[in-house]
Image (cartoon, helix red, strand yellow):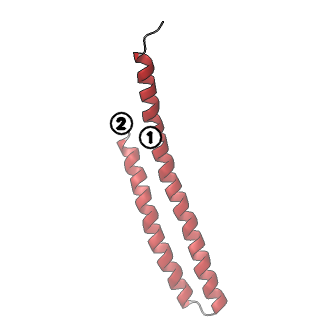
């Protein structure tokens, strides 16, 4: 396959998104537990979960974006090959 390294980077980015999710959720819960007051606890919990969700979405979008370009290149090369095979009138 032509762009194997890009597919590997896309897969690693997707795995990194899941790792960020696990660490982000656990650290948000931990910060929510150790906060001194209830509003601070809720703020840390919701803020941490929101930031974690944004990072996860960015990482997953990056992985899909890389995969999209690889798929586009593959489709375009198939179209170019089909156009070369067609007889001209």
Q: Nearer the viewer, residue 77 or 41?
A: 77
Q: Residues within 10 Å of mark 1 (few under 14, many from 20)?
A: some
Residue 29 x %, y %? 51, 82
Compared to residue 21, the image places residue 14 above or below, namely above
Compared to residue 69, the image places residue 78 above or below, namely above
| Residue 36 relative to residue 21: left or right | right
- Residue at x 49% of width, y 50% of height: 64
Residue 79 x %, y %? 45, 26
Q: Which mark is residue 58?
A: none
Dividing the picture into quadrants, the one containing residue 13 is: bottom left
Q: Earlier in the sequence, mark 1 or mark 2?
A: 2
Residue 80 x %, y %? 45, 23
**Name of the residue lying farthest toward the right:** 39
Dividing the picture into quadrants, the one containing residue 43 is: bottom right
**Name of the residue lying farthest toward the bottom:** 36
Residue 71 x %, y %? 45, 40
- Residue at x 44% of width, y 40% of height: 70
Split into 4 quadrants, where in the image is the N terminus? top left
Mark 1 residue element: helix
Tag count: 2
Q: Residues within 10 Å of mark 2 (few under 14, many from 20)?
A: few
Dividing the picture into quadrants, the one containing residue 81 is: top left
- Residue at x 56% of width, y 74% of height: 49
- Residue at x 42% of width, y 28% of height: 78
Mark 2 residue element: loop
Name the residue carrying label 1: 70
Name the residue carrying label 2: 2
């Amino acid at each position: 396959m032509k762009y194997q390294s890009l597919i590997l980077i896309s897969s690693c980015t997707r795995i990194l998104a899941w790792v960020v999710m696990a660490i982000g959720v656990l650290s948000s819960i931990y910060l929510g537990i150790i906060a001194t007051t209830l509003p601070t606890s809720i703020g840390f919990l919701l803020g941490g979960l929101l930031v974690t969700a944004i990072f996860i979405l960015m990482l997953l979008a990056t992985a899909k974006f890389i995969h999209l370009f690889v798929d586009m290149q593959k489709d375009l090369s198939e179209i170019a090959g089909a156009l070369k095979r067609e007889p001209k009138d």
